[in-house]
Image (cartoon, rainbow, N blue to C red):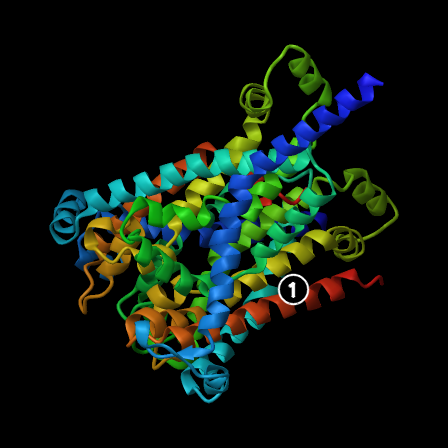
Amino acid sequence: MSKPSKKMTLNKKHNLTGWVFLAPGALLIFFMSFVPMGKALLLSFKTGVGAAMKSCGIMNYTRMFQDAVFVQSIKNTFFYLIIQVPLMLIFALILASILNNRQLRFKGLFRTMIFLPCATSLVAYAVIFRSLFANNGIINLLLVNLGILDQPYSFLTNTWSARIVIIIALLWRWTGYNMVFYLAGLQNIEYSVYEAAKIDGASAVQSFFKITVPLLKPTILLTAIMSTNGTLQLFDESVNLTDGGPANASITMSHYIYNMSFKYVPNFGYAAAMSFLILVLVAILAFLQMKVGDKRD
Amino acid sequence: MIKVRKFGMYLFLIIVSFISVFPLYWMICASTNKSAEVISGRLVPGTYFMENLKALLASQNVGRALGNSFKYAIILTLLSLVISSLAGYGFEIYHDKAKDMVMNIILLAMMVPFVATMIPLFQMFSKAGWLNSTMGFILPTISTPFLIMMFRQSARSFPHDIMEAARIDGLSEIRIFFQMFIPTMRSTYAAAMTITFMNAWNSYLWPKVIMTDSNSQTMPMVVANLTQGYVTDYGMLMLAVLICTLPTAIVFFCLQNAFAEGITGAVK
């Protein structure tokens, strides 16, 4: 009789130990993530500065859709999302499946070089790309010397080229990062599957679409959600590459929210409302992607 | 036919590798050349390194920024590893229904974009007097859902027999964690360390919000400051970029596999 009761107390003790171990981490997340999120929600229904803040209903939420700059920043962010994320994931998949080839030589070297951009900080690579694409930068020098351009083109002060430079920079920085996920995923696929497909006469393209893509689906879904989440929060590139310009043509939502909170006359209530829209967008897009990813074909 | 395809494959890889490496090579060349030479398109390392360094040190307090960045990143990484791994271990080893539910709630925090918590955090931290402090820098990211999940996964492979044996030997639960778990999971810790250090070193938005005093600025902030003027001294600017990149590049080259495991770590 005494044995089970002793075990009970031991279990209870272990149960309590578990709570003690996870408490610091869990409480920090609670106070650093969920509490501020709740406060931001309350803040989004207020207007004014500091102690003089007063309730204003949903005014902040109706205001943002009449705010031309914010609408522009939503369009820009979605432009980056729709063009850059699919391109990057496709490139990363192709690179990973080439590097997964057993007969390939210098595999490690190629992997390291393609992965290398991840070693740079976001500010650093944004500044490098800003310099490369400057009026007196090396890209213009090259294009003029090759005779493609008569005179330097101002990439960073023209609407579309500024946006495209941001996309090029993002592709450069993040393709290798996603490739590493796919390489890790490919390790779990038996290589003999590919060899068998080859013997059966499947081409490289066929095995890519019939083996690699379906088997990597969970990884593709994960990278798609992560990239979507990251793109909706783009900040460093918009600030340091184009400074949101020209005339807010390349500004991202986070950049505008930052300006609204800390650069212009602070309007925390309005900024909080806009940040809540990002939260909702992240949740909706992740949900949609999971729905699409779940479908059996 | 097969030879042509093989050639095409290598050519493709060489082009992609070149594009990946070139901007970094250009940065290194630029940091050792005069600004005028950089503009004229010189693509070999030069001898102007010391002059660029002098100009950089005269314009920005790089030493202080480097010191700050190292201090913030190292303290954050150490605390983060202990607290997140202890939580991940607690969630897995002592798991029951209630703890699994708490874990699921914590995972939701992954979806919360940083801008949505930034303003209240700024208000809370300025009230607490944590602006311009190490505490202010580290507190929001000491414990992350990603790291907790990663350590929870790795704790799954921690052999039960070892724990039972240690308990019979009279080791307390916390000592089992420090003396058995940490040494066994060395590779997970290496992966978590690289990813946390890199994220801390590279972070920009949060320090920009709370480091209002120039004495507390980080290295990425100094690099961003340098681009503000109208005329850019490319030699000096790229030297600053190089200095800012060096620590993460060293971590990358020494611990590349750990880093790859770190970013994909919680996925398995």
Q: How many marks?
A: 1
The quadrant in which the C terminus of chain A is found is: bottom right
Q: Is residue B57 visible?
A: yes
The residue depicted at 77 percent of the width and 51 percent of the height is A215
Residue B45: which quarter of the image? top left
Asked if A162 appears above or below B69 in the picture, the reply is: below
Q: Residue at x 55, y 40 (%)?
A: A23
Residue at the limit of the structure toward the right, as seen here: A200
**Front one among A83 and A279:** A279
Query: For this view, does B65 lie left or right of residue B10?
Result: left
Which residue matches tag 1? A286
Determine crowd level at label 1: few under 14, some 14-19, many 20+ residues with C-alpha closer than 10 A. many
Chain letter for mark 1, please. Answer: A
Image x and y of residue B148, in percent = 58, 42
Q: Residue at x 31, y 69 (%)?
A: A262
The amino acid pointed to by label 1 is Ala
Q: Identify whether B228 is placed above or below A27.
A: below
Query: Which of the 4 quarters of the picture holds residue A5?
Result: top right
**Residue lying furthest front:** A1
Does dot 1 land on a helix, a strand or a loop?
A: helix
Q: Quadrant of the N terminus of chain A?
A: top right
* Left or right of B112 in this view: A127: left
Res A133 quadrant in image: bottom left
